[in-house]
Amino acid sequence: MSENLSSQLGKYLPPPVLALVKIGGKDASELGQQLYLVGGVVRDLFLGRANFDFDLVVEGDAISLARRFANDSQAKLTVHSRFGTAKLDYPGFSLDLATARSETYSQPGALPTVNPGSIKDDLIRRDFSINAMALHLNPQRFSELIDLYHGKDDLERRLIRILHPKSFIDDATRILRAIRYEQRLGFKLDAETEKLLRRDVAMLDTISGDRIRHELELILKEDEPERTLRRAEELGVLSRLHPSLKGNGRLSKIFAKARQSDIHGSILSIYLCLLVYNLNDKAIAEFISRLNFPKNSAQAMRHALQLKRHIHSLANPKLKHSDIYQLLHSYSTPAVQANALASQSPIASQHLNLYLRKLRYVKPLLNGEDLKRMGIHAGPKIGEILNALQKAKLNGKARTRKDEEKLVNHLR
Ligand code: ATP
Ligand code: MG
């Protein structure tokens, strides 16, 4: 087994990382400490999936080891003494070191009380068996697998399994994490885990808005977030975040369409707008407040709904380019993008896409300074003329600088 894993490590860890963890293991031995590679990277090593989150756990003191390790491997070192963690930065990647910890939960949903502990303590506090494996890095035991909860078997059986029946009660963010891994990896929830998840769905109410939002963002960063959303709906998880949320078929088609269209900017904000596309004002306000969304995303979601309501005015084939600009320029971009994807009117979609691809970038060649130089006095007149220039340019009535100057002279 050990030899097998050693070659696995050699095969899937990039060579510089392999060389480094060996240095770390040697340093740990010299300090009488034990060093392990843990969590997601071990899981992905067995699955042959790339993972550049190198999490290391130290039985002992991560900070003293990190100092020596950084020194022996020419790393840039950042220490967080309060958390007993350290980061070693190398060109292109980094290693995270943490002191092994034991955790207790004083009440559901609260952050746990943390104390230094053994690797065993550190693994039992983790979310799922497949995330609770460790590989020893000290030279005498290099690549030995610590797998107290049969994570390796669960990887082979393709199961997501919690470590104890109170797991979702201790930390209900695991409900969202379970579904995310299940869908990412094409696994199934273990039957008992699914039963407990369904039983404990209401525990999501004990989690702060910020933590729920963070998990939702992690879902939206997956390759195909709509899979997780659909499953979350099926399990009654989505409606726990807000009763009006749906992860249904039309939504999933639009998510896929969003990825295929060439989007400038954040696809995350577009997904959010699509997620709330069928909600009403009250529901959106509640959802924004529950997840404590920052201003930008909150505004994008509200705008998506406002624009949806005015979409009929964009379905008029006679609109001039300047009319389209006028109708759209005050909405945040993701709201316009979401409507371009979701609108059922082909003409409206065409106009929305024209705005996104072209019209929103149209600016006159002359600016305020040019107008002053032409003898226009500073004041509201400048703004009026600039608007008129932009309108003319949008409608193809002013192509060159000369055209614009002519128009200025006509308007002054
Ligand atoms: P990903 O590929 O999504 O980054 P990961 O396994 O690296 O997966 P992280 O969110 O980076 O996940 O967390 C690192 C490790 O910390 C996990 O593998 C898991 O062992 C543990 N962990 C993270 N969140 C929780 C939680 N809510 N409860 C228990 N353990 C957790
Ligand atoms: Mg990770």
Image: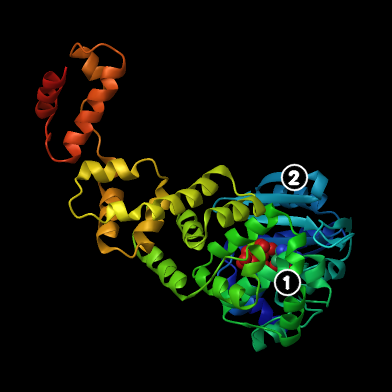
> Where is residue 207 drawn, in percent x and y?
74, 59
| Precedes in sequence: disc 2 or disc 1 | 2
Q: What element carries label 2?
A: strand
Residue 48 rendering spot, x and y as whole percentages: 57, 77
Q: Position of residue 119 (x, y in %)?
A: 84, 67
Task: Say which residue appears at 87% left-offset and 60% top-offset.
Answer: 107
Q: Nearer the viewer, residue 80 or 222?
A: 222
Query: Can you say whether 268 is above or below 331 in the image?
Result: below
Can residue 160 be seen by looking at this rendering? yes
What is the quadrant of the C terminus in the image?
top left
Residue name at image x 42 percent, y 45 percent = 332
Front position in the image: 125 or 375: 375
Pointers 2 and 1 in contact (C-beta within 8 Å): no
Res 129 → quadrant: bottom right
Tell me the element at label 1: helix
- Screen quadrant of the N terminus: bottom right
Residue annotated with mark 2:
79
Q: Is residue 371 left or right of residue 330?
A: left
Amino acid type at image mark 2: Val
Inspect this view and state whether residue 19 appears: no
Question: Badge 1 is on which residue?
Answer: 201
Q: Can you give x and y, in whole percent of width and height, for residue 353 in the image?
A: 29, 55
Please say which color scheme the image uses.
Answer: rainbow
The amino acid marked with disc number 1 is Val
- Is residue 104 left or right of 211 when viewed as pictured? right
| C-alpha separation, residue under disc 2 versus residue under disc 1 | 37 Å
Quadrant of ligand 2: it is bottom right
Q: Left or right of 23: which side holds 359? A: left
Label 2 Cα crowd, 10 Å radius (few <14 / some 14-19 / many 20+): some
